[in-house]
Image: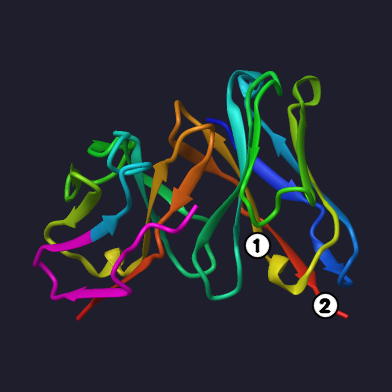
Amino acid sequence: EEQLAESGGGLVKPGGSLRLSCSSSGVTFSSYSMNWVRQAPGKGLEWVSSISSSSGYISYADSVKGRFTISRDNAKKSLFLQMNSLTAEDTAIYYCARDLSLSIDVWGQGTTVTVSS
Amino acid sequence: QSALTQPASVSGSPGQSITISCTGTSSDVGIYNLVSWYQQHPGKAPKFMIYEVNKRSSGVSVRFSGSKSGNTATLTISGLQAEDEADYYCCSYAGSSTFVFGTGTKVTVL
């Protein structure tokens, strides 16, 4: 069964940048589209970004468009999220999640991003 | 990309059945049979429960079922148990490789 593990979270100042990584233990990582989903403290889930299996199709939520960049390295079974121009509203747990035929099924445990001066 | 609307809280006694609604629009829930439901306990990652409106994920109890009518999807929990107390989120595919989540519902077992 595929397992996902996020890393790269931490404390960053407003306007700063951070790069999140997600490592997959599965052998079929390259077959699936992948997503980033976030959850602000005490709030609900928010879809952030999606990337297709071959990186040919990428989409973003309006709230992060132009600031965040999703990418993947199938050879290393890894997913990334480059986050720039961070604000306090980006403070959240960021989850890496697999897309199983347009249903998000497997989730990592999340990595926490805190944007504060 | 507005969040799907869910009731903030639903409660029931052990053994009872409860329903959680998830209302979207004709651009997401209404047009795609791609509604999923997730259970989230405090401090934990979401757990995949239901997909494609009414299909249970592997290992999920038959007490959980899903349905959809028009722009509203519904999660039903039958025979409510103490371990069902958690937050529940719906999610719909919204086209062009985007997804939209519900506002979340806190289920309390009385």
What colour scheme governs how the chains and residues are painted in the rendered image of this protein? rainbow
Mark in front: 1 vs 2: 2
Q: Position of residue B16 (x, y in %)?
A: 9, 67
Nearer the N terminus, badge 1 or badge 2?
Answer: 1
- Extreme residue in the front direction: B26
Confirm whether the magenta stretch covers residue A26. Answer: no
Identify the residue at horizontal 17%, vertical 61% (top origin).
B19
Identify the residue at horizontal 77%, vertical 48% (top origin).
A66
Residue to which mark 1 is pinned: A93
Q: Chain of mark 1?
A: A
**In the rendered view of the protein, which quadrant contains the C terminus of chain B?**
bottom left
Identify the residue at horizontal 32%, vertical 52% (top origin).
B24
Q: Amino acid at mark 1?
A: Ile
- The magenta region covers B1-20
Closest to the observer, B91 or A7: B91
Q: Position of residue B105 (x, y in %)?
A: 34, 68
